[in-house]
Image (cartoon, grey):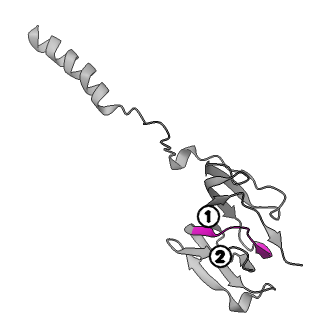
Amino acid sequence: MRLCVFAVTFLVSSSTLFSQDLPKGAIQIRADDIVWTDAPPSLPPGAKISVLEGNPMLEGIFTMRVKFPPYYRLETHTHPKDERVTVLEGAVYVGFGSALDTANAQKFTEGSYYLNPMNEAHYVFTGEEGVVFQVTGLGPWGLNYIK
């Protein structure tokens, strides 16, 4: 009987030991919990986004995931603040200049990181595999297309 009481007490107390109360402000998102939505109209159709932290349209830090399908093109544009990008899946091509030039872009594959400085004209496109990347920056974030 004592062994049974001990076992039940141990199981109840160990479940408390292994459960986790997150501190205020903690964020934990598992890959299976990410919800993708269509990107806003500022991006060409086909892009998907998932905001993980903050709000890109407001002051403060934000982190979002972006998914571009194969053969996607984002014309030359700038951002009002630095844009930090980590490639998670696939590959993306990035070039600087006032016109999209596929011959002069750099390829960034899974695990790569790059920073697009604020107000620097650049363009982005994908090849046959598409890409998923993560953007971290300070809001408000936006795209200003070069015409």
Residue placed at 55% from the left, 76% from the top?
A: 109
Disc number placed over residue 144 in the picture, else none: none
Type of amino acid at the residue the image marks with label 2? Pro
Residue placed at 71% from the left, 92% from the top?
A: 103
- Residue 20 percent across, percent down from the top left: 37, 34
Among the 4 quarters of the image, the one containing residue 139: bottom right
Residue placed at 63% from the left, 48% from the top?
A: 54
Among the 4 quarters of the image, the one containing residue 46: bottom right
Q: Pick the residue in front: 138 or 90.
A: 138
Task: Let me know if residue 21 is in the magenta part.
Answer: no
In the depicted structure, whether residue 91 falls above or below residue 63: below
Q: Residue furthest top?
A: 1
Task: Quickly name the residue at label 2.
Answer: 117
How many circles with numbers are drawn on the protein? 2
Mark 1 neighbour class, 10 Å CA radius: few under 14, some 14 to 19, many 20 or more: many
Instruction: Please state, as top left, top right, bottom left or bottom right, where the C terminus lies in the image.
Output: bottom right
Secondary structure under tag 2 reads: loop
- Residue 29 percent across, percent down from the top left: 52, 45
Q: Residue furthest front?
A: 59
| 64 sits left or right of 57 in the view | left
| 3 sits left or right of 69 in the view | left
Q: Which residues are magenta?
A: 73-85
